[in-house]
């Protein structure tokens, strides 16, 4: 047997071992997918991937081969994510509103391969997870300009679900109207109360009348259905496109740093032991008396925890 044939026989034997190890690895990937689906966790975990790459770099001494091995690892992780998506593509994510609402956009960014299930309000989206109709719910906790979403905070405090992820979504509000309408024709705006508050100064300067809707996408739907050139909605550019409307004015929110923080609620707690950031969300009540909140916060600091906004 010549040297070429020997090398090929060695490759064939190693390929058989690689195939067996690949199957074992994908079994572990499937378990990871099931864990993430049960806890409402996204497929991509960037910090975990970087950890795998860093560890892989230390396993190969030859600098030339190390570069190829890292390419091999990245391609393997790409395949792993594809397999996870296939396992999780039936995942049902509840959100409040209709297609095009900011919660729908947030759910799509966190879980791009899931089925997004609309619900009329926050409690019904939350209860859909409690009942098991959905795997998780994506609901807004607070806005950097308008403050907390009280109804969702109440659900988080009193309900049985766990928060397994918090994600910040930059929010750009736009004035949207019928395709043939103009800014000068607008007399009334409709949107969710939070969006109206975020754009209060803009609306006030124009002297427009305000009407409330359950969310920004519903507001866009109202404008599209009524066909009134004097009526506009405050919503995202994606929502305008979805309902056949046009953007009459861009970036009308008062704060350029307008961000809404969304939480992922699920039935199973995520108890990971390899967290690189020891963060947690703490909800509590205090007595209605002077200094009660200050004393509670001071206890947090005394135990070495740092508060983040």
Image (cartoon, rainbow, N blue to C red):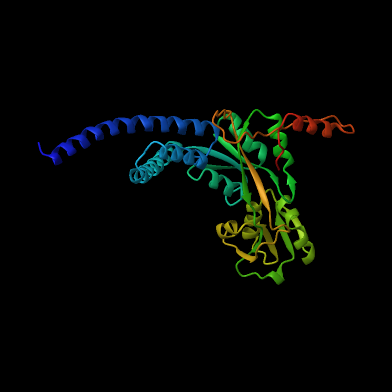
94 sits left or right of 298 in the view:
left
Q: Nearer the viewer, residue 175 or 263?
A: 263
Q: Residue at x 56, y 33 (%)?
A: 275
Q: Residue at x 46, y 37 (%)?
A: 88
50 sits left or right of 268 in the view:
left
Q: Nearer the viewer, residue 272 or 11?
A: 11
253 sits left or right of 4 in the view:
right
Picture coordinates of residue 284 (x, y %)?
A: 75, 30
Q: Nearer the viewer, residue 62 or 130?
A: 62
Residue furthest to the right: 290
211 sits left or right of 44 in the view:
right
State which quadrant residue 200 falls in.
Answer: bottom right
Picture coordinates of residue 160 (x, y %)?
A: 65, 28
Picture coordinates of residue 12 (x, y %)?
A: 21, 35
Q: Nearer the viewer, residue 209 or 144?
A: 144
Query: In the rendered view of the protein, which quadrant contains the C terminus?
Result: top right
Q: Residue at x 20, y 35 (%)?
A: 10
Q: Is residue 197 visible?
A: yes
Picture coordinates of residue 271 (x, y %)?
A: 57, 28
Above-or-below relation of 39 to 212: above
Q: Is residue 89 visible?
A: no
Query: In the rendered view of the protein, which quadrant contains the N terminus?
Result: top left
The number of numbered discs placed on residues in the rendered structure image is 0
Above-or-below relation of 165 to 193: above
């Amino acid at each position: 047997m010549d040297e070429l044939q020997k090398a090929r026989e060695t490759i064939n034997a190693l390929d058989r071992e690689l195939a067996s190890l690949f199957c074992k690895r994908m079994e572990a990937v499937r378990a990871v997918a099931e864990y993430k689906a049960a806890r409402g966790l996204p497929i991509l975990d960037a910090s975990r991937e970087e950890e795998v790459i860093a560890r892989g770099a230390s396993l190969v001494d030859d600098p030339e081969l190390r570069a190829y091995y890292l390419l091999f690892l990245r391609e393997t992780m790409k395949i792993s994510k594809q397999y996870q998506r296939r396992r999780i593509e039936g995942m049902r994510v509840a959100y409040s509103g209709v297609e095009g609402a900011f919660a729908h956009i947030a759910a799509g960014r966190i879980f791009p391969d899931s089925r997004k299930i609309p619900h009329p309000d926050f409690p019904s989206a939350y209860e859909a997870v409690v009942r098991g109709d959905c795997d998780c719910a994506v609901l807004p906790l607070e806005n950097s300009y308008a403050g907390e979403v009280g109804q969702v905070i109440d659900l988080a405090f009193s309900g049985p679900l766990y928060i397994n992820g918090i994600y910040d979504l930059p929010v750009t509000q736009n004035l949207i109207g019928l395709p043939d309408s103009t800014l000068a024709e607008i007399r009334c705006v409709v949107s969710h109360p939070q969006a109206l508050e975020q754009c209060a100064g803009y609306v006030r300067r124009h002297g427009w009348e305000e009407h409330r809707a359950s969310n920004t996408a519903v507001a866009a739907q109202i404008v599209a259905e009524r066909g009134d050139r004097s009526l506009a909605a405050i919503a995202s550019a994606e929502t305008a496109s979805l309902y056949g409307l046009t953007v009459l004015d861009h970036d009308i929110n008062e704060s350029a740093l307008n961000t809404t923080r969304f939480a992922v609620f699920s039935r199973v707690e995520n108890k990971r032991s390899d967290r690189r950031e020891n963060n947690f969300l703490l909800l509590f009540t205090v007595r209605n008396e002077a200094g009660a909140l200050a004393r509670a916060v001071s206890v947090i600091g005394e135990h070495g925890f740092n508060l983040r906004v």
